[in-house]
Image (tube, rainbow, N blue to C red):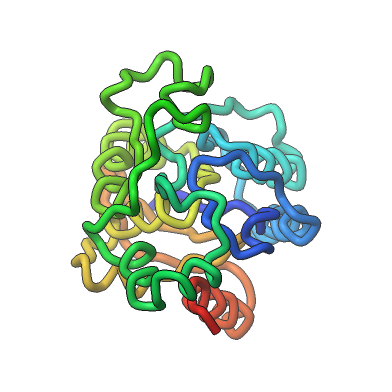
Amino acid sequence: MHSLILLRHGQSQWNLENRFTGWVDVPLSSQGISEAAMAGKLLREQNFTPEVLYTSMLDRAIHTGEIVMRELGRSWVPVHRSWRLNERHYGGLQGLDKSETAQKYGDEQVHIWRRSFDVPPPPMDPSSEDHPQNDPRYADVSKSLLPSGESLALTRERVLPFLKDELLPAAAAGSTPVVAAHGNSLRAIVMALDEMEPDEVLQLNIPTGVPIVYSIDQDGTARNRQFLGDPEQIQAMMDAVAQQGKST
């Protein structure tokens, strides 16, 4: 059995401010930096020795991966970045306060935007300077693939090829890859690995900075999932994620 390690980035400044972040580049908060360091320490205590790091193209995941590898004394391992690991694109909601948005549109509508499987948020205007089509980091990606807003179903569509073509083969080969990514791109991965139905994954809340370790067979099949850390603290963090986006 080999291991695949998934890690949602540490708390970002907009996580702290309860804003829809999506593909906006937002730095880690001071708590997020501490969470990333703790994730590295937990992995070191369990004697994990990853040989490769995968991150999204967003700074909060990149920084988290760097901190984790430094804590493990493995900053030298190869790093691969992919837009396919980016957070779900929240379209026209990006930058908005979640509670204020709920007060304006209602808790139910915001819950649908945040937690439905196949309902995307209001789209971002492609002419906006914030649209990924106008961001040089995605210059090598076909414009037809770059989103204006995504549901979890659409996020899953872009993440799954990377999981199948890159992450699972690396894990099956024994390289113990670390994937530093985001709540929704990781939910898409967990959904696939655990063979979840849409209604099941909608109840999954992934906390920031908590390593998720999968055991992977040589044929690339996931056998079990384990969160590293104190179970009560992790549950409290999951509950806090679930409460985001409510007006009160």
Q: Residue 200, relative to residue 219: is it above or below?
A: below
Q: Residue at x 76, y 53 (%)?
A: 33
Identify the residue shown where x is 38% and y is 58%: 187
Residue 30 image position (x, y, % from top left): 80, 56
Q: Residue at x 51, y 32 (%)?
A: 130
Q: Quadrant of residue 99?
A: bottom right
Measuring 32% from the left and 41% from the top, which residue is drawn there?
A: 159
Quadrant (top left, top right, bottom left, bottom right) of the C terminus:
bottom right
Of residues 38 and 144, which is closer to you in this image?
A: 144
Q: Is residue 168 left or right of residue 29?
A: left
Residue 177 visible to the viewer: yes
Outermost right residue: 30
In the displayed image of the protein, which residue is found farthest to the front? 104
Count of numbered badges drawn on the protein: 0
Q: Nearer the viewer, residue 153 or 196?
A: 153
* Residue 105 lies in quadrant: bottom left
Residue 197 is situated, as x and y percent measured from the top left of the image, at 19, 67
Q: In the figure, is residue 100 to the left or right of 194?
A: right
Q: Position of residue 220 (x, y in %)?
A: 28, 45
Q: Position of residue 194 (x, y in %)?
A: 28, 62
Relative to residue 39, is residue 182 drawn left or right?
left
Residue 65 in the figure: left or right of residue 126:
right
Asked whether 20 or 160 is in front, the reply is 20
Work out which residue is located at the far top of the displayed protein and give it: 140
**Is there any visible trace of residue 44 in the rendered image?**
no
